[in-house]
Image: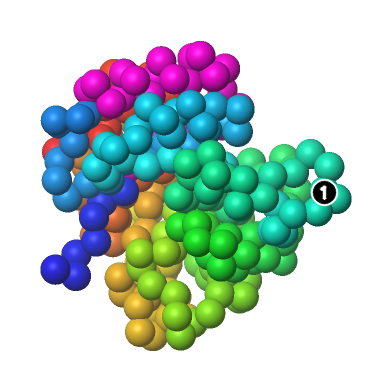
């Protein structure tokens, strides 16, 4: 079938020591091993120091993956403090984020640097999740559509249009004003933004833009997940705060 699996992704940000991360991962495995619906995939994105042990916890589990929140787009080299995609793969990662709003706005990463990461990560064999989204100020000024289109075009600029597939690339639409604020976008806001993302993807990737998954992120919780997952062009969710506890993240992953 051409319908992609729904992706439930948990971004643990800069939370959890290795021991805490493994405990959370073990709880998720126990809660979801038999309960994750067959058309869904689970992805967890722990901090670097927990990647390897969390990967070991998930080893052999179907449709459960570990990813990295960040990396540096080079094979190796004199990049003090940075981590290469090959090291992530070695630690058990199959996926990685690029362009998360906290890296755009707190760490001040540019669209150009984000584009380098998307292309390099793909070449290195990682499934890349490009995050985009407008700030409150941009939305108030009516610029949501332009911001979303611009971040997509710039972020995907170095991706090989002929060879990329929906199995390698996912987009996460995360309105900055809804991240970590408890403020969830209304269904109409999500529908209109995801329609813009879909149209832009279809223009940019004529052969596969309609199959690339689009995740929604921004204060997704156990009690709003089912409604969000049921919206047109929503192919999954990227969850921050509510992915830090077994109960809430399990409830989101099974929400129906
Ligand atoms: C995120 O970090 O991508 C996110 C959506 O965070 P939260 O769910 O806490 O808003």
Determine if the C-beta at disc 1 is less than 8 A from ligand 1.
no
Residue closer to the observer: 192 or 124: 124
**What is the tally of numbered marks visible in this picture?**
1
Q: Which range is magenta?
A: 8-31
Q: Position of residue 130 (x, y in %)?
A: 52, 58
Give the left or right position of residue 221, taking residue 144 as reference. Answer: left
In this figure, which residue is indicated by the disc labeled 1?
Answer: 79
Residue closer to the observer: 168 or 180: 168
What residue is shown at x 61% (from left), y 52% (from top)?
Answer: 85
Quarter containing the N terminus? bottom left
Are there few (<14), some (14-19), or many (20+) residues within 10 Å of tag 1?
few
In which quarter of the view is residue 29 placed? top left
Residue 71 position (above or below residue 252): below
Residue 242 position (above or below residue 5): above
Q: Position of residue 247 (x, y in %)?
A: 29, 18
Quarter containing the C terminus? top left
Q: Is residue 39 visible?
A: yes
Q: Verify whether residue 70 appears in magenta.
A: no
What residue is shown at x 35% (from left), y 84% (from top)?
Answer: 207
**Colouring convention used in this rendered image of the protein:** rainbow
Residue 113 position (above or below residue 250): below
Residue closer to the observer: 234 or 55: 55
Q: Verify whether residue 20 appears in magenta.
A: yes
What residue is shown at x 28% (from left), y 61% (from top)?
Answer: 233
Residue closer to the observer: 171 or 82: 82
Residue 167 position (above or below residue 215): below
Q: Is residue 171 visible?
A: no
What residue is shown at x 69% (from left), y 44% (from top)?
Answer: 83
Say what secondary structure mark 1 lies in: loop
Q: Position of residue 189 (x, y in %)?
A: 38, 53
């Amino acid at each position: 079938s051409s319908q992609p699996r729904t992706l439930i992704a948990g971004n643990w940000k800069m939370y959890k020591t290795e021991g805490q991360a493994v405990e959370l991962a073990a709880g998720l495995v126990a809660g979801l091993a038999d309960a994750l619906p067959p058309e869904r995939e689970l992805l967890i994105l722990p901090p670097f120091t927990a990647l390897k042990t969390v990967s070991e916890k998930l080893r052999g589990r179907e449709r459960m993956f570990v990813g990295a929140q960040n990396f540096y787009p080079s094979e190796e080299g004199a990049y003090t403090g940075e981590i290469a995609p090959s090291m992530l793969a070695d630690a058990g990662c199959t996926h990685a984020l690029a362009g998360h709003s906290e890296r755009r706005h707190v760490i001040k990463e540019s669209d150009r640097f984000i584009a380098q990461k998307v292309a390099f990560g793909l070449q290195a064999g990682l499934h890349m999740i490009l995050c985009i989204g407008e700030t409150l100020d941009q939305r108030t000024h009516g610029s949501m559509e332009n911001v979303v289109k611009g971040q997509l075009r710039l972020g995907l600029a170095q991706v090989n249009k002929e060879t990329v597939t929906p199995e390698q690339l996912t987009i996460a639409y995360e309105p900055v004003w809804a991240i970590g604020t408890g403020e969830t976008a209304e269904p109409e806001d999500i529908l209109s933004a995801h329609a813009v993302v879909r149209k832009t993807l279809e223009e940019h990737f004529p052969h596969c833009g309609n199959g690339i998954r689009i995740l929604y992120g921004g204060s997704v919780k156990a009690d709003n997940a089912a409604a969000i997952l049921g919206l047109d062009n929503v192919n999954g969710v990227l969850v921050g705060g509510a992915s830090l506890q077994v109960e809430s993240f399990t409830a989101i992953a099974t929400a129906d």
